[in-house]
Each structure stands twice: as C-alpha cells, then as structure tokens.
Image (cartoon, helix red, strand yellow):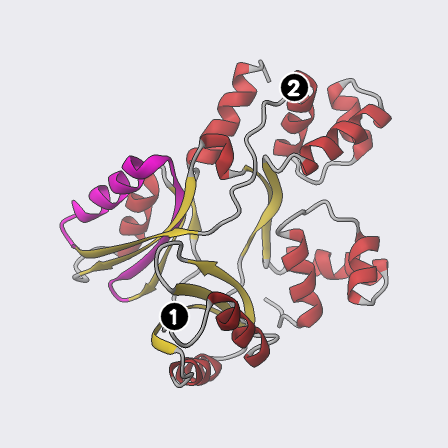
Amino acid sequence: MRDLDEIDKGILLTLVSNCRTPYETLARKLGITATAVKKRVKKLIDTGVIVRFTVELTTAMVDGGTFLALISTDGSEREDEFVKLIGSYGMAREVGSSSAGLYTAIGTFVGADGLRKFGSLARSIKCVTKVELHTLTWEVGKKTEFTNLQLKVLRCLVDDPRMSIEDISKRSGLTAKRTRTILNQLIESDALILGMRLRLSGGDNVSFLSRIEWDEKLANLGQVLDSLTKMYPIEYWFPMISAAEPTVFAVFVVKSLSDVDRITKEISRVPFVKSSMTLLGKPNEAFPDILDRRLEEMLKEAGL
C-alpha cells in the first residue's frame, strides 16, 4: 500500500461522499489535472486503499440511526470468530479488533429497542466483560419513496456505483438524457450515498481511532474539532461524534507507530481533554446490515 498524501486525502474524502464526483471537479478542487486525479484513483484502487465502491441507503430510509460500540472481552475468544459473530447479528456493518480484548463495531439500529438488542446480544457472549454504546450524530438523510424508473437506475448502480450513463441507459432501456436526470434525482434525494469502502491501514500507513472525552466547561464541540484540524491538518481525517456524551472518535492516518504514540501523548495534554484512548488494530471487516437488506428488499419488491 502506498503512502497517502494530502491530495490522496482530498480525493478519498470527496469520493467517500459521492464516488461519482467527476475527475474535473476534483481537479479544480485540488489544483491538479483531471488526468493526475484519474491516475491517483487508479493507484488507490490497485493498492487496496479503495476496497470497493458502494451504494447505501441513508438511515432515514429505515427510520434508524448509527451507533458505535466498544466491546471489551476477557481475551479468551478467538479474534476472527468473535468478529464474525458480532457481524452475524445483522446490525454492524463494520467490526474490527482494536487491541487484545477490545473490539469496535459500527452499524445501524432502528429505535431504542434496536440499540438495546445489539447491546444485549453482545453482553450475552460469555467472554464479553463490557459493552459501551454510542449513538452517533451521523447525517441521517431523508426518507424517500423511489419511483419505478429510479429503482431501475438504482439497480444498475448497486451492480456498479460508477457505471457510465451510456451503460445505465442500455441496461435500463431509458434514454441517456432521462438516465442523467434520474441519476441526479437519486444523488440529490439525500436518501442514499454513493460512496466506498476504504482500507486506510497497511504498508506505509497506520490508521487508528482516538476516543477523546472533553470538558464541556472548557470547550464546545466546534472548538474540539477545530483544534484537531489545526494540530493535525494531514493526520486527522474525520470525526465520529457521540450524540449523548462529550466524546468524539477521531480517525487518524499516520506513517508509523511512533506517530501514533506522539499524537496520543499530545492529545492527552490538551487542556480541555478529560480522557483519551487510542484504538489501534487490524482493518475492519465489512458485513451486510439493515441498510443493505432494505435496499435489496426494495429492488426485489420492484421485480429487479
């Protein structure tokens, strides 16, 4: 895996929100040529940083929300089996081992009962000693009723999120002009995300999660995020913010374990930080969740 620089970061953070963003748009944003963007995207795919492009419903489509769970164990489990067990519950879309006896799970829940169900299932596992659940202030999007024509185009996108207008038109039987209009409707609906799965750790890169709890008397959320951006303009990538507590899970990508140690120590010394914990481990494993199943149900109901 290649070393990631600031331009790669800009490309990835844009494509993870809309993987169909034109290379020309990225080029203008990043100050390089469209050809250079195309070459970098190809390299990111070839080296495994971009695992695959995806189509996902937003959580509003299932009247749900996003959660992050920290699961602690006594260490008696087999790591790979435990990750698969958590994924088999059908709520977590990503599960990873952060260190010996500590796992993270990110997924979708529907209603308070759904969140409780995940916590109960996790706590029922013999080796589990603690489950810490956080609902996240993730963008929920909008609930939309797709038309049959929109579902036809969506079927093509599920097979290939970056399928060309020409190919979608051929498969759907729609004109290119109509296909382009429907595609724009889908993108602007806020009911789905054309994104991608990333693998930021490996080779010359180390990805880690920093769990940061701050003192609300000394700083608000905006000040916390601004500080992270100013302190680590390249290493800090994006936050996952707890909805109920003054806690943020910040994603970092660095070049070495010594950088992990340095950033961990620096964050712990920031005046408004009450506590911090570094979660470093293997890349997360992906699983189908509620959103994936609902999307397939919608397409199946439409005969697609």
Q: Position of residue 241 (x, y in %)?
A: 44, 59
Please state which amino acid type lies under the numbered disc 1.
Glu
**Mark 1 vs mark 2: which is more N-terminal?**
2
Which image quarter holds the N terminus? Answer: bottom right
Mark number for residue 216?
1
Give the SS element for disc 1: loop
How far separated are the C-alphas under marks 1 and 2?
46 Å
Image x and y of residue 180, in percent: 80, 31
Q: Is residue 275 visible?
A: yes
Q: Quadrant of the C terminus?
A: top right
Q: Is residue 231 above or below residue 34?
A: below
User: Which mark is on residue 80?
Assistant: none
Q: Residue at x 62, y 23 (%)?
A: 146
The residue closer to the viewer here, 71 or 145, is 145
In-front residue for pair 270/102 = 270
Q: What is the tally of numbered marks visible in this picture?
A: 2
Tell me where residue 256 appears, x and y as whole percent.
50, 80
Q: Which region shows up in magenta?
A: 100-128
Which amino acid type corresponds to the residue marked 2 in the rendered image?
Thr
- Residue at position x 63%, y 26% from top? 155
Q: Is residue 65 magenta?
A: no
Dot 1: few (<14), some (14–19), or many (≥20) neighbours within 10 Å? some
Position of residue 303 in the picture relative to residue 220 (left or right)? right
Check disc 2 and report the residue beneath it.
147
User: Furthest residue to the front?
Assistant: 217
